[in-house]
Image (cartoon, rainbow, N blue to C red):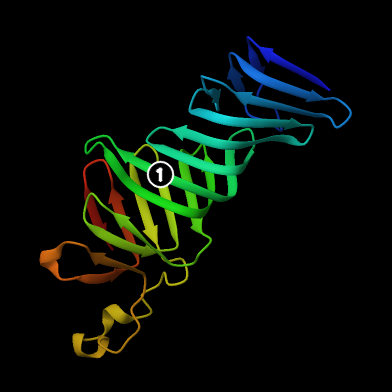
Amino acid sequence: SMVAITDTFYITECASTPDAQAGRIDVKWMPYQDEMFATSRNTPFTLYRGETKFRGQLVLRPAGLQGGGSAVIRDAELYADVFDMKPRNMTSNVSEFKLKSELYDSVAFLATDVKSDIDFDKQIGTFMSNKGIDCIPLNIVEYLACIDKFVWDMNKKELALQNSKSNTAQGVAALPLDKRVDRIMQGGKYISTKPEQDSLAFYALQGTYKYNIGQLTAN
């Protein structure tokens, strides 16, 4: 094996890996195993044509690139022990996702234990809870969103919030109000955390959380 400290490090985007660049990092090359480990020091790696800053360790093998650590992508930060890094998308079976609102200078959304798939060409991130329905605080609008799936639109700066197992109205909208009372409501559940609203709650097939302007809408 070889152990070194590099002044310049880069991986060229190809059919199996994204591009990656860094300055001074630690490298361990194991030629007989056909593996190279690259670990960031004071500055992060830059990946995906400049769209991602990554701190942690990258592992390069003939099959492709993996990483463990934290990835900053626009307003978001993703943490995972294992990311699979394909040329134009990055996935993890177990990750943590945190969004920050520029306007409110605070954490707008935090989800743990989620499967994640970031598509850099579509500028979309898709996330599925490993825990089933999870009630996630939307602190900026003072609601809990009880959902198991959300989709992040990077350009629109919004999240589409869903209950993937209950995504059709099943005719509830056509019923008179007195007939809806005993029906199991469909969609995600949204619960107000404002003390003066006394746990006001409603269901919606899809919620849209515009985290940069502090707005929650429901359909």
Seen as rendered, the residue at the extreme left is 196
On screen, residue 142 above or below 131: above
Location of the C terminus by quadrant is bottom left
Q: Residue at x 21, y 86 (%)?
A: 176
**In the picture provided, is 181 more to the left or to the right than 135?**
left
Q: Residue at x 45, y 63 (%)?
A: 148
Which residue occupies the foreground of this view, 12 or 109?
Answer: 109
Location of the N terminus by quadrant is top right
Answer whether residue 11 is visible to the viewer in this image.
no
Which residue occupies the foreground of this view, 117 or 171?
Answer: 117
Question: In the rendered image, which residue does mark 1 sit on?
Answer: 98
Q: Quadrant of residue 137?
A: bottom left
Answer whether residue 185 is visible to the viewer in this image.
yes
On the image, the x and y values in percent for residue 134 come to: 42, 64
On the image, the x and y values in percent for residue 214 come to: 21, 47
On the image, the x and y values in percent for residue 105 come to: 25, 36
Q: Residue at x 63, y 36 (%)?
A: 67
**In the picture provided, is 74 more to the left or to the right than 189?**
right
On the image, the x and y values in percent for residue 11 come to: 67, 21
